Image (cartoon, rainbow, N blue to C red):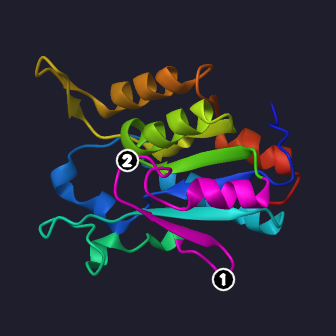
Amino acid sequence: MPVMLRDDAVLMVIDLQKSMDDPARGRRNNPGAEDNVGRLLAAWREAGRPVIHVRHVSGDPGAGCRPAHRCSQFKEVAVPVPGELIISKHTPSAFIGTCLEANLWEEGVDTLVLCGMTTNTSVEATARMSGCLGYETYVAADATAAFDKRDFAGVLRGADEVHALSLANLHGEYATVVSCADLVSGLGVGA
């Protein structure tokens, strides 16, 4: 079912950086996430709607996402175009220590659509805060992905399970979880 959004709804592409391809992260789900992010970006741009790119930047000298490292660069599918805001963050939430909230306030934005990496970390942290701050928040379930993760008891949980539980944590409380196809069809463009 198409999702009808306000004309000023912002697409936020979170942490879709080359560092996400590091094999040390382990097995991940949803290999089509990047393609779906590309579909969303194309549709948003065609509709002339605002896009914000969020990049995680680490101060840790050994981290792959420190500012000068090639892994901190955006993946090809998510390279910003002129006029799209780029926000660098140092915590999982795109709201903490950044200009995001001030920019949204200044532009009068009240609706955010989130996609990117990873479901249970930066996407979830940003969606939770967005919902708590009163923004109408959507998460594109098939335009994000998770990695295998050990739970508190040390049990390895598969990426599909981690992804599904993270989305379940968000849906109805902090955000509305939807599909990429429903978002694109609601825009009424050809993407």
Answer with the quarter of the image where residue 83 lies: bottom right
Marks 2/1 in contact by CB < 8 Å: the verdict is no
Span shown in magenta: 79-108
Answer yes or no: is residue 32 visible: no
Does the magenta-highlighted stretch encompass residue 100?
A: yes
Q: Is 21 located above or below residue 84 in the figure?
A: above
Q: Is 121 located above or below residue 94 in the figure?
A: above
For label 1, the SS is loop
**Quadrant the C terminus occupies:** bottom right
* Residue at x 22% of width, y 33% of height: 149
Answer with the quarter of the image where residue 145 lies: top left
Q: Position of residue 5 (x, y in %)?
A: 83, 43
Which circle, 2 or 1, is nearer the viewer? Answer: 2
Return the residue nearer the eye: 174 or 160: 174
The amino acid sitting under disc 2 is Pro
Q: Position of residue 60 (x, y in %)?
A: 17, 64
Q: Position of residue 31 (x, y in %)?
A: 42, 48
The amino acid sitting under disc 1 is Pro
Residue 71: assigned label: none
How many numbered discs? 2
For label 2, the SS is loop
Tell me the crowding category of disc 2: few under 14, some 14 to 19, or many 20 or more residues within 10 angstroms, Cα based: some
Residue at mark 1 = 82
Answer yes or no: is residue 53 visible: yes
First in residue order: circle 2 vs circle 1: 1
Does the magenta-highlighted stretch encompass residue 113?
A: no
* Residue at x 63% of width, y 79% of height: 81
Tell me the crowding category of disc 1: few under 14, some 14 to 19, or many 20 or more residues within 10 angstroms, Cα based: few
Relative to 87, is 153 on the left or the right? left
Q: Is 16 located above or below residue 75 in the figure?
A: above
**Quadrant the N terminus occupies:** top right
Residue at mark 2 = 92
